[in-house]
């Protein structure tokens, strides 16, 4: 038996509700349930116990040695990936994590033999990252954290 819940729709959003009723190919109950699952999957990804303490060694150019950075979060993919973007140097590898505060950490390496990352960058959201990272890496991050609709803006 299904649990009964009541949703109150503000008067100024009633048109959205009615449009959803007309557009949806499923019941509004099923639509709301599916959208809530997606939301919880996105927002609750790290806060639902999927977080761990992550340690990252980053090369410090000034000192010529490693700096260890520690934070709580979850790696978005297990092995570093290379960009297919030809505007970036071949051999640049990326890895990304989502912190418990929903910030995005991106570490990069350019094929060094130091066994550590060269850059450690933190972004508030995927749009901030898009200003500095290749589009395919941003898309991979967006997909991993459930951000729908990441679009590469073109000035053509």
Image: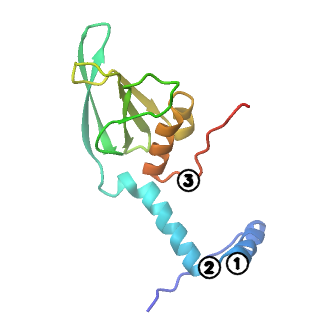
The label shown at residue 83 is none
Label number found at residue 148: 3
Q: Write the residue at 30% across / 54% down.
A: 50
Question: In the image, is residue 71 above or below residue 21?
Answer: above
In front: 117, or 72? 117
Earlier residue among tags 3 and 1:
1
Q: CA distance from mark 1 to mark 2?
A: 6 Å
Q: Within the image, what quadrant is residue 153 found in? A: top right
Residue bearing mark 1 = 21
Nearer to us of marks 2 and 3 is 3
Task: Please state the horizontal and vertical placement of residue 99, each as a whole percent of the image.
Answer: 37, 42
Q: Considering the numbered disc 1 on the image, is that residue within a helix, a strand or a loop?
A: helix
Q: How many marks?
A: 3
Q: Quadrant of the C terminus?
A: top right
Q: Which callout, 3 or 1, points to the residue nearer the camera?
A: 3
Q: Is residue 44 left or right of residue 58?
A: right
User: Helix, strand or loop at disc 2?
Assistant: helix
10 Å crowding of disc 2: few (<14), some (14-19), many (20+): some
User: Residue placed at 35% from the left, 21% from the top?
Assistant: 110
Q: CA distance from mark 3 to mark 1?
A: 22 Å
**Tag 1 and tag 2, C-beta contact below 8 Å:** yes
Residue under label 2: 28
Circle 3: element type: loop
Q: Earlier in the sequence, mark 2 or mark 3?
A: 2
**Percent from the top left, x then y, of residue 128?**
55, 33
Residue 11 location (% of width, % of height) = 76, 70
N-term mark: 1 or 2: 1
Foreground: 57 or 99?
Answer: 57
């Amino acid at each position: 038996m299904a649990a009964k819940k009541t949703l109150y729709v503000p008067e100024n959003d009633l048109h959205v509700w009615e449009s959803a009723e007309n557009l949806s190919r499923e019941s509004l109950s099923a639509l709301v349930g599916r959208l809530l699952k997606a939301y919880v999957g996105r927002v609750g990804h790290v806060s639902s116990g999927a977080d761990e303490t992550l340690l990252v060694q980053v090369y410090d150019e000034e000192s010529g040695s490693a700096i260890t950075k520690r934070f709580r979060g979850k790696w978005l993919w297990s092995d570093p990936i290379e960009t297919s973007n030809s505007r970036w140097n071949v051999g640049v590898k990326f890895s990304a994590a989502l912190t418990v505060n929903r910030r995005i950490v991106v570490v990069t390496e350019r094929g060094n033999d130091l066994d550590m990352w060269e850059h450690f960058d933190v972004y508030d959201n995927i749009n901030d990252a898009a200003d500095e990272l290749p589009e395919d890496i941003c898309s991979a991050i967006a997909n991993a954290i459930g951000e729908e609709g990441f679009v590469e803006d073109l000035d053509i």
